[in-house]
Image (cartoon, grey):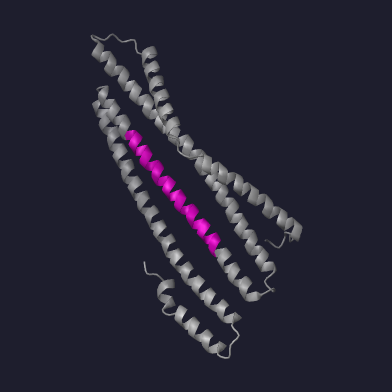
Amino acid sequence: MTEDQKPLTDSEFEESIGVLKKRKEHLQERVESLKFKPGWFILVIIAGGLAGYSFAAITDFRHYENLTQIIDRRLSYVVIGALFGTFMYGYVFSFFRISAQNRLRRIEYKLVQLGAEELQDKIEENFFTKLVKINFKYLDQYYLQTQEQADKSFRLASNASITGLVIISIGIIMMFFDKTEPAYVTTAAGVISEFIAAVFFYLYNRTVLKMSQYHQKLVITQNISLALKISEDMETENKAKVQEMIIERLTTDINKYLSTPE
């Protein structure tokens, strides 16, 4: 919360949290409904094939010597239409699902942020416990940001891969129309696109590995916080000694885990 903003009252804060939670539930239902549906996918492919055939029947006025040439020609347009329908289905489906996921993640981030601000405002009450909770809230924010970056990397890699596949398919189809040289150029461009996609997938894999390292550090942080919390609540004659033992056991070689080498 910035200095220019007035702090929210308890009722305003609860109202903001309630609104965000309702929006979160709505978006979760939205994301759940945007699943891949085989029936719709097959229907789109059939519609694309029929559209390609209709386009060929309307626009192709050339004279063919036999029925085989006509079938080959029309079949090529059917394949093109089916591929175009597949591409459009995947694009539209991915667009709406990813948009809903991004909105959901922003709301989750906002909820975590509000939770951290509330804890900061009330940190005087049970200082240590609130401090631990604030730490985890900020870790949650970091996780959501990292997850969003990983999703962006995956989408970029997927789009590059799909684009390369479409370009290669166009090159193969052009060969059926006896346009050999343009087909070679198009196919080569598609192969290059697939290589770029492979690089993007590699970067995505690196991001996922970093997230895995983050999870390991989170477990260590949880262990340390748990040890401190347990030792704080103990009421024994050997409390200081037990505290020292717990902390020593749980923080053994801690630097080795917190500074993971590249």
The C terminus - image quarter: bottom left
**Which picture quadrant has residue 231?**
bottom right
SS majority, magenta: helix
Q: Which residue appears at 46% of the width and 49% of the height?
A: 152
Residue 247 shown in magenta: no
Residue 165 shown in magenta: yes
The image position of residue 58, as x and y in percent, is 39, 12
Q: Is residue 234 above or below residue 130?
A: below
Badge count: 0
Q: Which span of residues is magenta-colored?
A: 139-167
Q: Is residue 6 above or below residue 257?
A: above
The image position of residue 165, as x and y in percent, is 33, 37
Q: Is residue 25 left or right of residue 224?
A: right
| Residue in front for this viewpoint, 77 or 228 | 228
Q: Is residue 1 left or right of residue 214?
A: right
Residue closest to the far bottom: 237
| Residue in front for this viewpoint, 159 or 89 | 89
The image position of residue 85, as x and y in percent, is 41, 28
The N terminus - image quarter: bottom right
Q: Which residue appears at 31% of the width and 22% of the height?
A: 76
Q: Which residue appears at 53% of the width and 43% of the height?
A: 31
The image position of residue 52, as x and y in percent, is 38, 21
